[in-house]
Amino acid sequence: MVEGYALYSEKVMDHFRNPRNAGGMENPDGTGHVGNPICGDIMELYIRVDKGIITDARFKTLGCGAAIATSSMVTEMVKGMAIEKALQISNKAVAEALGGLPSVKMHCSMLAEEALKAAIDDYFTKSVHINTA
Amino acid sequence: MEQVYLDYAATSPTHPQVIKAMQPYYFALFGNPSSIHACGQQSRAAIEEARSKIAAFIGADSEEIVFTSSGTEANNFALKGTAWANRKKGNHIIISAIEHHASLESCKFLEKQGFDISYLPVDGFGMVNPESVIEELRPETVLVSVMHANNEVGTLQPVVEISAIARKAGVCFHSDAVQTLGQIPVDVGRLGVDFLSMSAHKLYGPKGVGALYIRKGTRISPLLHGGSQERGMRASTENLPGIVGFGAAVEIAESEMEQESRRLCQLRDRLIRGILDSIEGVRLNGHPVARLPNNVNVSIRCVEGEAVVLNLDFEGICASTGSACTSSSLEPSHVLSAMGLSHEMAHGSLRLSLGKWTTLAHIEHFLQVLPGTVSRLRAMSPLVITGKEAD
């Protein structure tokens, strides 16, 4: 039997099968809600921030294997990361951390990047609001 | 549990009896059917025997069957071949919106060549309304093409009514019977078709062989040139073992189909009932009654089809989906879209197709696994299911 051909890398399948940080978060400091207009996937990413460091990240995703795996990976990547650094995470970096994605699935990794940016954006909006209150 | 294969509409395993019938034609009986020596003429005889079996199975004459490499080629042949042969008569083709890509893409190609294509809509069950054909007919219409049953949602089409309308207007009619051959009776006389596409590997025959029925006296141009095989209708040395296998597969279907389709209908209905009863927010896609015996297609809210299919695969279950995420175009299934399903419902579609080696134990195993898979994915979903939404 010929082996070794698979749609996704082993790492993608691992994150899809055993997603890290899946589920909601109580009173997150920032929430990012994004939808993928291309295929219809939806992702929500929640972050907890302490002194400029992302201390926890969780996600909820409605989407394919690539969407779930990139959600899982991005939450792993940002935990313990300074916000400024997290803002620089690109979809390519998430895909690379997963050992690559099929080219037709690269758009799925955009969802992870956008959700993270939206969550950080939300955090900044909220903290500005608190500071001026 | 062993592997549970629920993707027979994609392809079926080759029946061991079929393999046995094919075996001699690789080494012992390998001659080129066009050769005039004994070695070649034995092969010729084997091909003609297969041809007459297939012809008899669909109520046709042997000389009305042209072997092709696939159902895809048969559809290409019927559409392009008719268009080209009738160029002087007209440039208009009527086709349903839910045809296989082999037909739709052939029409897209013909559009670029200056042909005008009308796409027939379908209702919420995925069925073409024969009246809509009347509205689209023009003096320059050269072909109407509506499939016998849809490959994704299993809906049987009113082919008899549509062919009568086409005949009355003096227009040729083609039907893609790839999904129905061996599943339900296919008789070219009763269906009133001028062209009928078939494929061997959907009925336990080998991959790489199909056929087009061409009613005697119907105009069509060949796609392949360079030899007088298939009475000049398709040049290329015949796929001898494949054609023999196709004949053997049809022979088995002839003796087993009636009983087998009854058995599959029962399994299908158990599967549909089981899914609808055990999971909230699910709808059946396709017609509840006018449906292929082996097809189940459901949409499951708040999950994505590829994620479901991959999870089922972990459990040894093979299924398929019409989700945009699995297509290279990132478009949801054109069939589900034509039926009016929202992008979201197409996103969560799951097709299960049964066959000869599907057992009740497989169905029960699937029904054990699916609810857990769905609730695991839903727990991860930002959308929340409410029972009413399914309607």
Image (tube, rainbow, N blue to C red):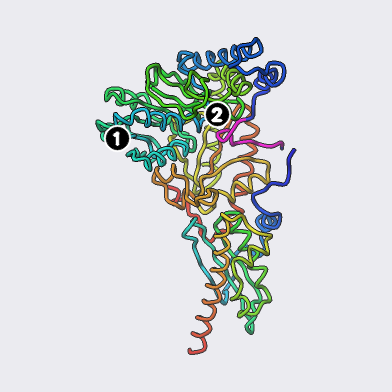
Q: Is residue B69 above or below residue B125?
A: above
At x 59% / y 66%, what residue is drawn? A91
**Residue at figure coordinates x 40%, y 27% from the top left:** B174
Would residue B125 be seen by someone viewing this image from the given angle?
no
User: What is the count of numbered marks?
Assistant: 2
Mark 1 is surrounded, within 10 Å at the Cα level, by few (under 14), some (14 to 19) or many (20 or more) other residues, namely: some
Tell me: residue A81, above or below residue B352.
below
Image position of B37 (left or right of B169): right
Give the position of the N terminus of chain A as an image quadrant: top right
SS at mark 2 in the image: loop
Q: Is residue B6 magenta?
A: yes
Residue B229: image x %, image y %?
53, 20
Q: Position of residue B210 (x, y in %)?
A: 53, 26
Residue B234 belongs to magenta span:
no
In the image, B94: left or right of B239? left
Q: Which chain hosts label 2?
A: B
- In x, y percent, where is residue B4? 65, 36
Q: Are marks 2 and 1 in contact (CB under 8 Å)?
A: no
* Residue on which the image places disc 2: B69
* Quarter of image, res B218: top left
Near-viewer residue (B227 or B299): B227
Position of B278 with respect to B337 (left or right) is right
Q: Which residues are magenta?
A: B2-12
Residue type at mark 2 is: Ser
Residue B49, labelled with which disc?
Answer: none
- The chief SS type of the magenta part is loop
Would you call the spot at circle 2 few (<14 residues within 10 Å), some (14-19), or many (20 or more)?
A: some
Residue wearing tag 1: B132
Chain label for disc 1 = B
Q: Amino acid at mark 1?
A: Ser
Circle 2 or circle 1, nearest the eye: 2
